[in-house]
Amino acid sequence: MMLNRRGVDMKVIQKKMLLQIVLGFFLGRVNLFGINPIGIAFFAAGYTEEGAKIPVGISVVLGMLTVFPMENVLCSAMAMLAVVLAVDLLEKKNVSVRMGHAALLLCFAVGVLTAFRLYLMPHSRYDIWMGFLETVLALAATRILYDGIHFLLHSKKGQNLGNEEVISLVMLGAFGVLGLPDVIIAEISVILTVTYFLTLIMGYCYGTGTGAIAGAIGGCVLVVCGWESSMIGIMALMGICAGMLREQGKLLLCASFFLMAFALGSVVNQSMMGMGELEGIAIAGGVFLLIPEKFLGKIQVHAGSWQDNWESEKLQKLMKYKLKDFSNSFQNLSSSMAKEPKEGELMNPKDARRMMEIMSNNICSRCENCENCRGQIALMRPEMFGTLALAQEQGQIVLEQMPVEFTRECIHQERFLSEANQNIHIANMAMGFQNKMAQNQRVIARQMREVGEIVDELAEKLPNVQKLPADLQERMTKELRKRRVAVSELAFYEKYDGRLEVHVRGRTWRGRYVTTKEVGEMISDLIGCKVIPCEECRKVFPREEEEFIFEECAKLTAITGISRLPKAGEDVSGDTFSCMYLPSGELLMALSDGMGSGDSACEESEQVIELLEQMTEAGFSESSSLRLINSIYMSKEDSHNFATADIAVLNLYKKSCQFVKCGASTTYLYHQGEMERIEGEALPIGVVDEMEPYMRNTGIAAGDYVIMMTDGVADSFLEEQECLEILLWECLEERLNPQDIADRLLDEAMARWNMEPEDDMSVMVVKVYDNLDRKIRGCQ
């Protein structure tokens, strides 16, 4: 049994050494501006490890012989030989040589040999700089590649990958790809195909962080090989795409990966997405689909669970930086698109001259009086260009606007004017199309900017991982096990607003069903803070392992009331409302009033509310969502309609409230015994291109009220606003609930319109209470 075990270990060691030798050959072929510090750095980084040493040096030299001239190969070989001799001498003197020592020895050897070569041979200032660069890169590359080599030679099954090891492994793979021959088969680049394949594999196996790193480094490889610099950003986004969609299955991932590459290539540079590139992506996806899932699972298990390590703060920081870079990319793309030429109104003199030449060739050249007519000369005078510009503005040109010589000499005036008016009509159509394209481009630029700001906000909202003390984590695991819940993973997050979130991955055993309410109470007792199961979670722990989320209980709770009525004679109200709890735990209250009344107004306000709900549920801020909705409105062919937006977001955890208004009526806030009017001067959605909503933040407490209404209700008290405030005070003194207050306000507004309202009416009321369940548990 022991001999068999040793035989298996020996086979594994031989495979690792073979991989090291093959990598050495391809890294020896890497040509960076005529130098190769990568191959010799790979040799130096692995020389202090228990792997192949001399065979790796030989493979690096053989790889260099296929690319570099003999003098460069000899210089690199002598540098590696110097490292071997120096390390051997130091070890004989009982000096332990580590990676740092090998890196310094290599740097010194390369520097001396480069200086000696430059001394013997004629050189320029460029050669001096390249020699200095090779020396520095040899030192840096040795350190970068060491972590990856160490992991390849000494990793154990299930060992976690650190950020340095991930980057080092990706760099090894990227340089290995760069060492491949630049072979193009049927317009398909082998390097491009392999780069797409490795990015897809890394994103699928190790998640978005590793996928982004692999994509960015792969993009750098392609840039070195001659592709455009925008490939760095494209490949990074594709790596993120592969990591985000890896849970959806291989087939959907490959389809999305292909569409993402096509879309990004088409938007950034259409020339980059030729048939060869698309076929290369398709081949990479096809090979990926052919790889058995069992083999991919072995790769993930062998490398450990770096991507699933819930308590990895380094991964969190990496994702934040990547989102920041993603945001900057959209901002820069928006700026570049906004710098394009503005809309045109009239044709320029060059186009006018070209038009006159075309008409002269089409009409005058076939005229029997062509050789004797002097009207052709008059058509080419500068004054005629101003006449054409005026005719383009009017839509046609008449005979009175033509030069005197033309009217006197031309014998086919009607035919010429007909041709000229037809060309003017075509020019106006082309100018209109060009102006529409410029408008759409500006809208896209604004949307790009908003997306960039939204991604930047998401980066700031990433949760902070909280390290749970080992003794408390052990206690919690034991208590759950007593309740027949086997826990495999346990993590704590502090969200951007300070709220605690507990993630538990577990299952029941021995046939007992345990409710999430029981588990939430047990966790609350241990950590001293009331937590409740997330609404999306199942109510009972199943027998199969599943993830459950427990959220910190809010300090406040709220009750809402809504009362609505359409305009007299209409069956449908043009007002739309929303009252929903967001995933962040905040309560969103929104009112939108479409322009006019009836079905058209209802359609406009419904679109605003639906888009707002979708974006805020995804984590976007209300102000960014409204600006993006406004840009969608302005991009429509018929952008004459508009809608108001009145939003109140109550954070029941932090005891705060944010008001956001776009052309909405006054909102009333009753806070700590005082009534306050909140008015905004912002324009409604869909009026102007650059819309900036009115925003205001304030605190809330138990016993507070928020009263929102559309202009149908507010206008009924337009001349007697004091009466509305008196009515509100009466409702508060009578301690009416929110629904009764909304009904009372609507009834009073109806009475002022003689029970026939001239506009749609809506009232929303919310009252804030202390969370009694939280107080009972003693968790403040």
Image (cartoon, rainbow, N blue to C red):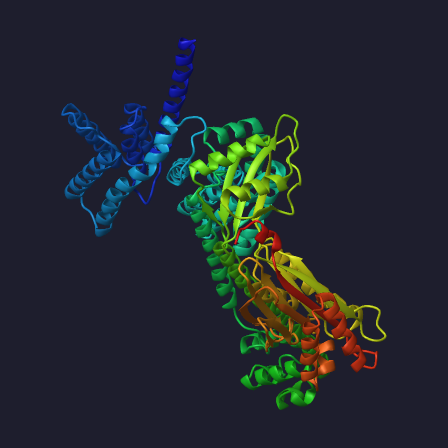
Which of these two is toward me, 44 or 738? 738
- Does residue 100 appear to the left or right of 281 in the view shown? left
Residue 411 placement (x, y as % from top left): 70, 84
Q: If the image is split into quadrants, where does the N terminus sit?
A: top left
Res 684 quadrant in image = bottom right
Q: How many marks?
A: 0
- Report whether residue 612 is seen: yes
Give the residue displayed 39% in from the left and 13% down from the top.
Answer: 6
Give the residue displayed 34% in from the left and 36% down from the top.
Answer: 145
Residue 499 placement (x, y as % from top left): 52, 52
Which of these two is toward me, 497 or 636? 497
Q: Is residue 674 above or below residue 208?
A: below
- Report whether residue 366 is seen: no
- Does residue 702 appear to the left or right of 526 in the view shown? right
Which of these two is toward me, 95 or 371? 95
Residue 340 placement (x, y as % from top left): 51, 68
Q: Is residue 734 above or below residue 14?
A: below
